[in-house]
Image (tube, rainbow, N blue to C red):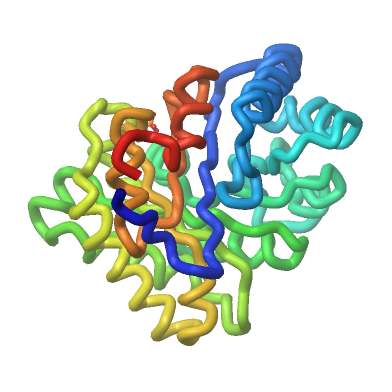
Amino acid sequence: MATVTSQPGRTPLIAGNWKMNLDHLQAIAFVQKLAWSLKDAGHDFTSVEVSVFPPFTDLRSVQTLISADKLPLAFGAQDVSAHDSGAYTGEISGAFLNALECSYVIIGHSERRTLHGETDEQVADKVAAALRHNLIPIICVGETAEDLEQHGPSAVPVAQLRGALAHVTTAADIVVAYEPVWAIGSGQAATPEQAEQVAAQLRAVLVELLGQDVADKTRILYGGSVKAANIAGFMREPNVDGALVGGASLDLAEFASIVRYQKHVGL
Ligand code: 13P
């Protein structure tokens, strides 16, 4: 039996990014069923952490459910404002997310960068805002197919990570998600070797900018067409510490199976 190679001190994280799916009633039903099915299967939540990222309008319902039923799931938001309060119509402050007991917030997802024109500077400001409000930012980086062709796999994600960390100077609690844009929603995941190659480069950037200790503790996730059938391969890689799952996180059985990758044949 091959060993699971996630490094000691880095608890693997399986994160479900629901994107703009499931309203608050559907969210309650889904989270309840997910927790029950994982508990029924005897999942050890301390060995693989599970978190969900519902739309903003679901967060209060998800918080109430998780807190009332003491469910061992973490949750977070899909974006945060760079500002703390004020005349920013439509934006959501990190203070509000913190008040809802969010642990995490996704920042700089490729859909925000592409569809909403988010720049590296804005991503950096949002990362700073998250940290100000005791939220763990999940910083998304990744290259397009064009970037891959022109610059190879690591150049753009490495530059995006450097940009995102522009205001981070102290030992920060962060998560990095490597999501090649060409792999998102395409059914064509990167290979574990490709993910490992970029994750190792990203960890080298963390060593350089934040020091060895922070780099050793920081989880680097892979995202892009992750499913139950391919998760185990990613999790065997030493620099991949989890997954940011889109489409498959909306399928209860599939997501539960991804979470339980340690039980898959060959691990
Ligand atoms: P898919 O898993 O649907 O490819 O989406 C990945 C993603 O964008 C997660 O943030």
Rendered residue at 44%/42% (across/down): 262
Whether residue 119 is visible to the viewer of this picture, yes or no, is no
Whether residue 150 is visible to the viewer of this picture, yes or no, is yes
Q: Residue 110: image x %, image y %?
A: 39, 43
Q: Residue 261: image x %, image y %?
A: 43, 38
In the rendered image, which quarter is residue 127 located in?
A: bottom right
Q: Answer above or below: position of 50 versus 68.
A: below
The residue positioned farthest toward the left in the image shown: 149
Rendered residue at 67%/43% (across/down): 76
User: How many circles with numbers are drawn on the protein?
Assistant: 0
Q: Answer above or below: position of 34 versus 47.
A: above
Q: Give the position of the C terminus as an image quadrant.
A: top left
Q: Is residue 82 left or right of residue 205?
A: right
Q: Residue 139: image x %, image y %?
A: 49, 57
Tell which quarter ligand 1 is in: top left
Rendered residue at 76%/49% (across/down): 93
Q: Answer above or below: position of 250 versus 96.
A: above
The residue positioned farthest toward the right in the image shown: 68
Q: Is residue 252 left or right of residue 66?
A: left
Judge by depth and name the residue closer to the eye, 88 or 109: 109
Q: Is residue 189 left or right of residue 33?
A: left
Q: Residue 11: image x %, image y %?
A: 55, 58
Q: Answer above or below: position of 119 versus 228.
A: below
Q: Is residue 240 left or right of residue 171?
A: left
Rendered residue at 45%/50% (across/down): 242
